[in-house]
Image (spheres, helix red, strand yellow):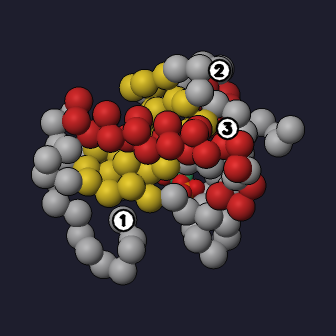
Amino acid sequence: MAEETIFSKIIKHEIPSEIVYQDDEVTAFKDISPKAKVHILIVPNKVIPTVNEIEDEDAALIGKMVLTAKKLAKDLGFAENGYRLVINCGEDGGQEVPHLHLHLLGGQKLRIVGLGF
Ligand code: 5GP
């Protein structure tokens, strides 16, 4: 079992955050330092540190993260205009928090500079 993270505390409502969706498997909350008009993080409730630790048995959970992003984009009204989904992995990928998370960025035209935000 991977160690608890700052995101685990958010999932358990132990530290404040703006949670926009939560169920038994995933939690979505607003990024504390938004890089776009809408910047939401979608995380599995169980700790998977990075993409490297995803197991075959997690396939449905990863799909659930993407489907949650799709639903939020629709509910927030920018699905048709488009948006960006990003997962950083490890140090070279720029991952800061060792708890797998899918960035949902949207609500505006995003710059295409490399693959940065
Ligand atoms: P990473 O660089 O690991 O892909 O992204 C981590 C993201 O988590 C960053 O965009 C950062 O702003 C966000 N973040 C870090 N700590 C917190 C926190 O305590 N609360 C919230 N809501 N977001 C956080």
User: Considering the image in quadrants, where does the C terminus appear?
Assistant: bottom left
| Visible residue check, residue 22 | yes
Q: Which mark is residue 12?
A: 2
Outermost residue toward the bottom in this view: 114
Residue hosting label 1: 117
> Under tag 3, what secondary structure?
helix
| Crowd band around label 3 with a 10 angstrom C-alpha radius: few (<14), some (14–19), many (20+) | few
Q: Is residue 94 left or right of residue 102?
A: right
Residue 48's quadrant in the figure?
top right
Residue at screen point 17% across, 43% down: 78
Q: Which residue is mark 3?
A: 6
Residue pictured at 58% horizontal, 68% vertical: 94
Q: From the viewer's perspective, is residue 117 above or below residue 31?
A: below
* Three-letter amino acid code at the position of disc 3: Ile
* Residue 41 visible to the viewer: no
**Residue 85: which quarter of the image?**
bottom left
Mark 2 to mark 1 CA distance (whole Å): 28 Å
